[in-house]
Image: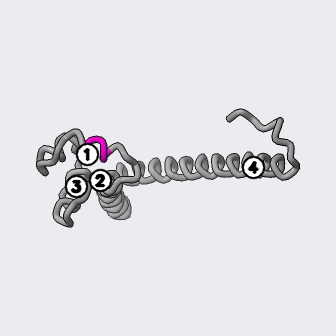
Amino acid sequence: MEFTEEQIAKIVKYASISYDPEKICKILGFNEEEFVIDFHNDDSQLSYHYDRGQLIAKVEIDLKNLQNAKEGDLFAQQVLKNDTRDRKLANYKKKQNLDTEKKNYNQLQAMVEKGDVQNLPER
């Protein structure tokens, strides 16, 4: 699907408040079936702008929380501490997964280069 700049701005805005694709579709007046299919396509413009809207809202909230924490809000400080810990853990897990995938890829590459294709894993 193709969207105008105005429609993209609205998609981003409605995504920032977590409206589901069916609601956004009705507001913007698109064919629901086509819109929902496009929404679930990770490579689509719609999916990108929806994710972007949610991310922008999260960043705005996090920045406001950071400001409140700096001003002495104890609850904001605790939320910031927990969010930081959670992000660090998620980043560590992603790095571990990438390291494992790289190791597996290198092992497969070595097997192929040796011509040892009979012992390749199924998948």
Which mark sits nearer the N-terminus, 1 or 2? 1
Q: CA distance from mark 1 to mark 2?
A: 14 Å
The mark closer to the camera, 1 or 4, is: 4
The front one of 69 and 117 is 117
| Lateral position of residue 28 relative to residue 116, left or right | left
Q: CA distance from mark 2 to mark 3?
A: 8 Å
Residue 101 appears in the rendering: yes
Q: Residue beneath label 3, please?
A: 11
Q: Could you classify mark 1 by the number of other residues whose Cα lies within 10 Å: few (under 14), some (14-19), or many (20 or more)?
A: some
Q: CA distance from mark 3 to mark 4?
A: 40 Å
- Asked if residue 86 is among those painted magenta in the image, a careful observer would answer no
Q: Residue beneath label 4, please?
A: 103
Helix, strand or loop under label 3: helix
Decide: is 86 above or below 13.
above
Image coordinates of residue 3 in percent, x first then y, are 22, 60
Are the residues at dot 2 and dot 4 in contact (C-beta closer than 8 Å)?
no
Q: Residue flagged by tag 1: what amino acid is it? A: Ser
The mark closer to the camera, 2 or 3, is: 2
Which mark sits nearer the N-terminus, 1 or 4? 1
Q: Residue beneath label 2, please?
A: 46
Are the residues at dot 2 and dot 3 in contact (C-beta closer than 8 Å)?
yes
Which mark sits nearer the N-terminus, 1 or 3? 3
Q: Which residues are magenta?
A: 35-39
Question: For the point 84% across and 52% down, which residue is it?
Answer: 113
- Asked if residue 37 is among those painted magenta in the image, a careful observer would answer yes
Q: Residue beneath label 1, please?
A: 18
Q: Residue flagged by tag 4: what amino acid is it? A: Lys
Are the residues at dot 1 and dot 2 in contact (C-beta closer than 8 Å)?
no
The front one of 20 and 42 is 42
